[in-house]
Image (tube, grey):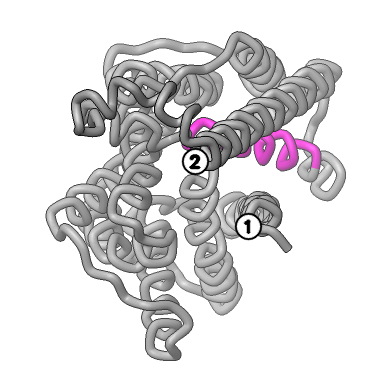
Amino acid sequence: MSESQRFQLGTIGALSLSVVSSVSIVICNKALISTLGFTFATTLTSWHLLVTFCSLHVALWMKLFEHKPFDSRAVMGFGVLNGTSIGLLNLSLGFNSVGFYQMTKLAIIPCTVLLETLFFMKKFSRNVQLSLGILLLGVGIATVTDLQLNLLGSILSLLAIVTTCVAQIMTNTIQKKFKVSSTQLLYQSCPYQAITLFIIGPFLDGLLTNQNVFAFKYTPQVLAFIVLSCLISVSVNFSTFLVIGKTSPVTYQVLGHLKTCLVLAFGYVLLRDPFSWRNILGILIAVVGMVLYSYCCSLESQQKASETSAQLSQAKESEADPLLSVENGASILTDGVVPKAPAWNSNKDLHA
């Protein structure tokens, strides 16, 4: 099996694991919050990260992956930023209507595209932009109902969008810059994320629910669902870093909207949630956008692969023919030095 085939299989596996684990944890948390009344989302997320770190520590002890330390300041900043973005998203949901919160999540994709275009010189073709537009339109039709605006909620949503975009871009950038795997990055950043959320979690949850997480009555059934949610979160957190590392932050957001559509469908089929023609139409449009996005990305990947192979074959031909080599490389031979690309080009294709 070639290296490209292994990469494709790994990417498909990461995407599948992300979808299955995310849909599972949403269903579990919905039962925990709606049925059992445990509404402390931020504190629960801090427990998720703590369990994830413990699980990875056991995996490290069993030598299932290798610990690779790198820039501690980058890890700490990334972990705190990730934890802050989760807290801001929860605050955005608490201070805004559900419809406005869904609009906040939809805005993450165009914001990510803008940031990658401005700071990493990444180019998105018109076909990719069109497919993303169709996807966002479909998800918007399916999920956005009411749009109630308020100043505080709008500010929190804006901060949530920016921090989430930057954190996801950093996930991809750090893995490629320091040549670390998703597991190694998750292992080192988990403690900082968990500590950040564990500190702010009880305060945010108390502000949003007017309840104390430590005064909640933890029945055996509640504890069982919390444990199940924490165990599933290990897979969710791992697959998140894996998907962003293997693909891009934009692809991860597209996958996130696929999960939203699946959750809506599962909610209707399994939990008999109310469903309307608008939900069905939105999901269908979103699926069309996702298929187009996948198709466009696949075409662009094939084009890049063919261009790379063509360049390699030309290089081999020039090496085999000394006269052609001299003709094509006259300027190099004249100067005696191979011209170097500008230093900033080394980061240009971090997200390609």
Q: From the viewer's perspective, is 304 left or right of 169?
A: right
Residue type at mark 1 is Glu
Q: Which residues are magenta?
A: 248-265
Spot occupied by residue 104 in the image (x, y as percentages of width and height): 46, 22
Q: Nearer the viewer, mark 1 or mark 2?
A: 2
Q: Secondary structure at mark 2?
A: helix
Q: Residue furthest front?
A: 323
Name the residue located 36 percent from the left edge and 35 percent from the top edge. Answer: 164
| Nearer-N-terminus badge (1/2) | 1
* Residue 180 is one of the magenta-drawn residues: no
* Front-most of residues 297 and 336: 336
Q: Residues within 10 Å of mark 2 (few under 14, many from 20)?
A: few
* Residue 261 is one of the magenta-drawn residues: yes
Classify residue 252 by image quadrant.
top right
User: Can the viewer see residue 249?
Assistant: yes
Spot occupied by residue 53 in the image (x, y as percentages of width and height): 37, 72
The residue that disc 2 covers is 319
Classify residue 138 by image quadrant.
top right
Spot occupied by residue 1 in the image (x, y as percentages of width and height): 73, 63
The numbered disc on residue 3 is 1
